[in-house]
Amino acid sequence: MRITKVYTRTGDRGETSLVGGRRVRKDSARVDAYGEVDELNSLLGVVRAHLTDSPVNRLLAEIQNELFTVGADLASPLEIKAPRIEPEHIARLERAIDEWNRTLPPLREFILPGGSVPGALLHLARTVARRAERRIVRLAAEEPINEHVLVYMNRLSDLFFVLARAINREAHAAEEEASFGPPPSPSGSSST
């Protein structure tokens, strides 16, 4: 299918079509869920713009393509034939998590999101993936969905956390441990 026209005017009244032709409001749980996935995909494009040609960049390109499958899956009620997330997609993410995590020192505490620019952006991608996951949970409460999509999104945010750490380690950006105590006193002041 070729996209020959950018605007169609069919959504001007706040509705859109799902795969199969059913019209729904643009703020429906289904549209909200795949819209969050679209935002995540765009954010990964920003991450990749800050990476050189690296294994992480190539992995993120594969994930961007898979996110189109996630979006198609979410845009397609189960009775419609459409690309779907399968257990193999999840297994590949798990292998990547294990492979990259083996290169990292174990965590002793929670860490602050940040570090290098691509590392910080991967931390942001992790939170956007979690938000998308929450929207998918809401959708699943309203109507049946492919159960593998939810598992995929859960693993994806885990992978982004591991990749953020790996990128930061490669960039020699130190991990800052989170502090749960009271804020430090201003320098030179006494505490009473």
Image (spheres, rainbow, N blue to C red):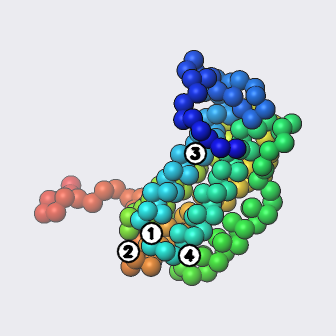
Left/right of residue 37 with respect to residue 170 in the rendered view: right
Is disc 4 in contact with disc 1, using a CB cutoff of under 8 Å? Answer: no
Q: Secondary structure at mark 2?
A: loop
Residue 146 pos. (x, y %): 80, 45
Q: Quadrant of the C terminus?
A: bottom left
Question: In front: 9, or 35?
Answer: 9
Give the distance between the C-alpha atoms of the residues marked 1 and 2, in whole angstroms: 15 Å
The mark that comes first in sequence, 1 or 2, is: 1
The mark that comes first in sequence, 4 or 3, is: 3
Of the residues shown, which amino acid type is indicated by label 3? Asp
Q: Residues within 10 Å of mark 4 (few under 14, many from 20)?
A: few
Q: Mark on residue 38?
A: 3
Of the residues shown, which amino acid type is indicated by label 1? Leu
State which quadrant residue 116 falls in: bottom left
Residue 138 pos. (x, y %): 68, 36
Give the distance between the C-alpha atoms of the residues marked 4 and 1, in whole angstroms: 10 Å
Which residue bears the numbered disc 4? 55
Reply above or below: 51 against 31. Answer: below
Q: Residues within 10 Å of mark 1 (few under 14, many from 20)?
A: some
Q: Mark on residue 173?
A: 2
Q: Residue at x 67, y 56 (%)?
A: 66
The mark that comes first in sequence, 4 or 2, is: 4
Which residue bears the numbered disc 1? 51
Give the distance between the C-alpha atoms of the residues marked 1 and 3, in whole angstroms: 20 Å
